[in-house]
Amino acid sequence: MDRELTVATELAEWASQRIRRPRDTDEVREKATPADIVTDTDEAVESYVREVLRREFPEYGIEGEEYGVHEGAAGAPHWVIDPVDGTTNYAHGIGWCSFSLGLATPEGKPLLGVVADPWRGEIFSAVKGGGAHLNGRPIQAAAHSSLTGHTFLTEWAAHAHWPGMDDLLRELAARHCTVRVMGSTALSLVQVAAGRATAAAIGEFHPVDALPPLLIATEAGAVAIPELPPYDTPLLLVAPGVAEEATALWQKTVVR
């Protein structure tokens, strides 16, 4: 995985620079709904990343947010790309979006993950079995023993609440656990890996933006519930010391 990680990290650095360019001429277009948008930058980043990946790893498949699936050779792993995760934030000048790139087995199990925060100059990375890193330095999930007094990150399902979300937020509030909705799935989930958030949850797991941070967080010692969700189902990432408390709460409010 050394070569794959090197290429993925170089692409994350390039994407971060591209995302930070002035947006004066960046056209914003609607996709499926008014809350689902794409910009020229989304398309330009994914096009370039695909070009490099197909040149460097011609047998590997590719699945991207903007340009769909390119089938690889039988039995080969495939890349997952979200060129700008948090496009709404990006398009409105809010500095909380990310570039996400991962590699998975044909069965969808994560092998490598990279998430870049262009605005803070941070690149989170992990290779299966190799631990998690932030700008090359090892990171670990928080050592907290309770949700109380700590931070819980989550995201809408596009513009809407997801089933169980309101009940979960009420229970967290009762525990004096501070919830934040930031606007980028990948960037929110890796905060658990860095120990900044005690837990994070999404209502709809999509590999293009959630598989890389899932690997990074678990390699940092976080617990994933479930270990690998089916597509479009909820995911909870939590620091190991609060796994029992968070699992009980998750089962009470979301998994019924």
Image: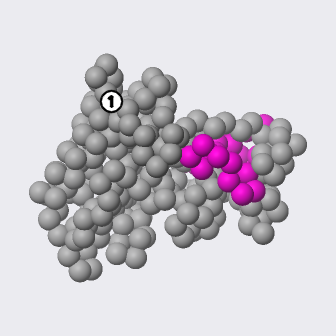
Residue displayed at 50% across by 45% down = 33
Per the image, is 252 magenta?
no
Relative side of 69 to 182, left or right: left
User: For the point 40% across and 76% down, which residue is it?
Assistant: 107
Q: Viewer-proximal residue, 116 or 146? A: 116
Residue 159 part of the magenta segment: yes
Q: Where in the figure is residue 204, as x and y percent of width and height? A: 58, 58
Q: Residue furthest bottom?
A: 74
Q: Of helix, strand and loop, which one carries label 1? A: loop
Of 192 and 29, nearer the camera is 29
At horizontal 34% and vertical 44% (from top left) the residue drawn is 83
Residue 86 appears anywhere in the view: yes
User: Which quarter of the rendered picture does the N terminus lie within?
Assistant: bottom left
Report the predominant secondary structure element of the magenta stretch: loop
Highlighted range, magenta: 140-165
Instruction: Find residue 192 and report its horizontal and vertical position in percent.
Output: 58, 46
